[in-house]
Amino acid sequence: MEGIQDWDGRVAVVTGGASGIGRGIAEAFRGAGATVVVADRDEAALGAAREGGFGTFRTDVADAESVAALARHVVEEHGRVDLLVNNAGVGPKAPLTGLTLADWRWILDVNLMGVIHGVHAFLPQLIANEHGGWIVNTASMSRFFTPPGYAPYVASKAAVEGLSLTIAQELEAGGHRVGVTVLHPGAVRTNIRNSLRSRPEDAGESGLVDFDIAEKITDERMWVQPEDAGAIVLRAVRGGDRFAFTHPGMVGDVEAVLAETRAAMLKYA
């Protein structure tokens, strides 16, 4: 569908928006004229966002009522919602044999249920918006490359992509003026390397450890800054794009994955 060009006077909500990719997206849409509400569970980061002039609301996306409270706050405070960015996510590491069921539940609750909670709470307002609206859901390039040690993370992000594409089809079929973009970031400078700081103390036994992928990706040319990711998302929404990618240089790697898929499909044709 046609994208939204003019963001003057519009209202955007960004979960996980106090730092990293979320902050980059928040900055981009504020720069385009939108009023941006930053939602996050990190109090220190929220404080920095407030000092930076953003409206903020403490939100735990894994908690449906917390996200519902965010939606009520935004509507009461601003009277409308034009953009929902479901960006909050965690990404610690553990081998499959080291994962507990509590680990699986926590990561899926944040990365997948957090997106579902956002869509459930905000979709009625987006549909009711006579000026149209947009949803951006953050997936990951790991959906194509499935790195070892990240089974719950990859599973959650693949699910986010599938959810996003299905929602887009349903909204289009229903004649609703709400677009959907799924963001696939690669190596972006964020705080995801410190994910365990947000794991609830009562979440149960864990085999997870934080891991900084900068130890693996040492080539500075492979890294993108959050503000660059934000600019990419703004461009994608304005362009009405179904997908947004932060690393177009990885297209050859994606093509190799797709070629392997194609060969498997035709092997016994």
Image (cartoon, grey):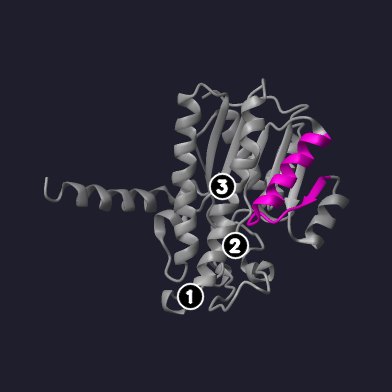
Find numbered disc 3 in the image and state the secondary structure of the residue it sits on.
helix
**Which residue occupies the extreme front position in the image?**
65
Point out the stretch of residues depicted in magenta.
54-77
Against 99, residue 120 (above or below) is above
Against 32, residue 198 (above or below) is below
Against 103, residue 265 (above or below) is above
Q: Are marks 3 and 2 in contact (CB under 8 Å)?
A: no
Q: Nearer the viewer, mark 3 or mark 2?
A: 3
- State whether residue 39 appears in this view: yes
Which quadrant does the C terminus fall into? top left
Q: CA distance from mark 2 to mark 1?
A: 15 Å
Depth check, front residue: 253 or 200 = 200
Number of callouts in the render?
A: 3
Residue type beneath disc 1: Leu
**Which residue occupies the extreme left position in the image?**
268
**Residue drawn at point x = 44 percent, y = 45 percent:** 162
Find numbered disc 1 in the image and state the secondary structure of the residue it sits on.
loop
